[in-house]
Amino acid sequence: MRSPTPNYFSFCLIAVLGCLLVASQPARAQSDTSLPPEPEAAGYWVAKEHDLQVLTPELGIAGHFKLGSWTEVRFSVRSEEFINSVPKVSIIALDSDGVPTEIMAPKSNQAGDLFFYRVPAKIGRRDSNLKIKFITEEGGSVKTSIREIPVSQLAKPVAASNRLFLQIGPDIGLGEALNRYASDLSDSTTFVTLPSPYQIPSQWYMLEGIDHIVWSANDPAQISAMQPEQLAAIEKWLKLGGKMTLSVGDKAADLIGLGKPLASFCPGTFREVQQLRNTTELEALINTVAHVDRPVEKPLPIAVMQSPSGIIVVQEGSRQASTPLWIRSANGFGVVEFFAFDLSANPIANWPGREPLLKLLLDGISDRLDESKVSMQSGSSVAHFGYTDIAGQLRLALDQFPGVRSVSFFLIGFIIIAYLALIGPGDYFFLRKVGLRMEWTWVTFPAMILLASVGIWSLATWWKGTSLKMNHVEVVDIDLESQLVRSTTWFHLFSPESQRYEVNLQPVTVPSNNWNQLVSWQGLAGSGLGGMSARQSISTVPTPYAINFALKDDTTQASLQELPIQIWSSKTLMGRGWGPLSKTEYEPLNERESQLIEGVLTNPTDMELTDCYVFHGRWAYFVAKLPANGSARIVPGQSAQNTEKVLKRRRVQESTDGGELWDRQSTDVQRIMEITMFHSAAGGRSYSSLSNRFQSYVDLSSHITGDRAVLVGKVANPPSKIQVDGQPVDDTQTQSWSYVRIIYPVQKRSPSEIAQK
């Protein structure tokens, strides 16, 4: 029988390979069409005991966040393990001292094996890492996974002494105008655009780092994409001290009409949309001959507001039948720059006068008074004092505790030399003097060391004290028209020993029955020693302390748990509170000629106010006492003083050019607070040579103009009580300064009354 030929074997081999190739095609096609695994978050695993993926982490808004202010961390997690075993998820971030803080995540939103988290965070170091921690307990075993991500890979940090502007909606050209704006404002402002409504948080305090919202509201679909709690968060942020530029146009009826989403942001009641052809006053405001309607030859759609409140910057028409185009109005403790026309659409978008108009808007926002004088002194502020913001001067003043003495390096060097002389030559001459043998040094040497140690310890205790000490400043603000109360508290704790504390704030005489309170650390703005923008060493405290958020009776309560303070060291803390005002009846004040006012001042609190001043426009009125739950009257003819002179009345020195300079080394808390509360009205940076950007919401200068007046008075006892480990700090070890400010509406004369006069 013949054997198979080589050609036959080759044919069989090719056939088998062909069959295998054909059989493998479906599997290969299936592999090619399958989705690749989702990329995991930036960073690395410090510990990983779960089968999970951390996806799409985001920090802040539009890839930016401000150091030392509350912001939001958003991320999603994919894990089948978490379906049956709910994890405890937390965020760990460094405070301004480099000590880790931990915040537990609220309940997640779940879609199958995908979990979505939104967590409040406050970051105090520019070059730091953020940790996302997962813990599960099942069957007595505990699993822990920690993902560590550099902050710089999540978002760009903005210095606490700089501004962060957020634009919502189409571009109105403010970013370009800002870049060409020749002032310190352009160098110290970051301008970002909201990429998605999803990034708006549902709690107002996570917008704390936003200084100004620029909202071009001409798209109802974009507003509809926002959740009601997001719109409520923006509104609360505004009412508690935010600043907003709002521009509307031909879609105003769908956005700011009665019952519409943005109606509460407007200074008045929307009536209708008109087509305006005559824009003479608007063109005259910026001194241009270019007509608004010339580029497209069509009229300007404007939103007509009925009974507008605030300052009308520009209006068209006669006094009896005027149409406001730009209104600057208070909204709670915040301010709205309202434009009744769309700055992002034609005919304004192509109008040559749009950029000069926006520069006028920036002039009102900027603090560029006397920049030549400020620029010479701002650099020395960092070099000599470590701060360029007035919040830094307040921090320095609150770090001065009675009975706590600073020790100079010269004295420390002297003690070291004396100690070495005592245990060396001193021991030798002592033995020679008393006639003892040198072998007795085995007794005298340790005895002298013990004696010196006891003496040094006693001296240190005498210098620093043995009691917990506290310096406490609190400002309670009341807006009668919006029936809103807020408080800002700064307090420093000095610990006589290394210990961990529980710290919270409890309202005592705050006039609100539904009070919210946040307590957290406070950082130092700037790049000086200890500043949040400076490069700092690693902290020696590895275990985090908790910022504990809790919901109680539909209010937000945040306290500190296990806060570490080293021996003879201080910790800088702050609190922000807010709530509705208990119902109060009041009458608006009345404005007469030359911005003089008269009327009844109502005190809606249980606190007696003393040494009061009422500020309205350029006038200030002294009121010696405003009784608790009582009233006082400003009568016609009552002596009025100049506002700026009242605010500059103490602790100034004459410079060589005859101007007044603020004492930047002063630790007089009362004087610092007087300027902090009305910084712009006192002259701003041209007076203090310090900015007021870190906590600019404290400044109510914008509310003493237009149809508002502000009363400020001192109170004897703090409206809130600070509790440490469940007990108030001993009054004998506490220094406190407390103020109450009340914003009164002012009824101005109508245009017809002015015309008749």
Image: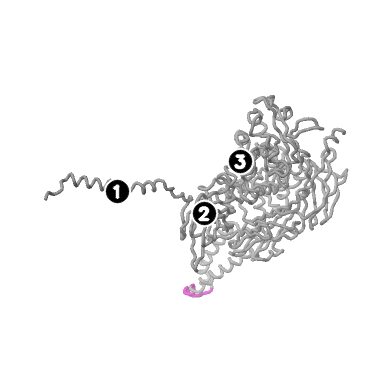
Instruction: Tell me: 109 left or right of 254.
Output: left
The answer to whether residue 663 of the structure is visible from this angle is no
Out of 620 and 698, give the one closest to the viewer. 698
* Image depth: mark 2 or mark 1 in front: 1
Task: Judge whether 43 appears above or below 441 on screen.
Answer: above
- Residue 167 location (% of width, % of height): 62, 40
Residue type (three-letter) at the residue carrying disc 2: Leu
Residue at the far left in the pictured view:
1
Task: Judge whether 300 appears above or below 420 on screen.
Answer: above
Q: Which residue is mark 2?
A: 114
Q: Dot 1 lies on which element?
A: helix
- Residue 634 location (% of width, % of height): 85, 47
Q: Which mark is residue 189?
A: 3
> Closer to the N terminus: mark 3 or mark 2?
2
Question: How far apart are the two marked residues, 2 and 1, measured between alpha carbons?
Answer: 40 Å
> Closer to the N terminus: mark 3 or mark 1?
1
Residue type (three-letter) at the residue carrying disc 1: Leu
Q: Which mark is residue 20?
A: 1
* Image depth: mark 3 or mark 2 in front: 2
Q: Dot 3 lies on which element?
A: strand
Cβ atoms at labels 3 and 2 below 8 Å apart: no
Out of 113 and 338, give the one closest to the viewer. 113
* Image depth: mark 3 or mark 1 in front: 1
Q: Which residues are magenta?
A: 434-441
- Residue 585 location (% of width, % of height): 82, 52
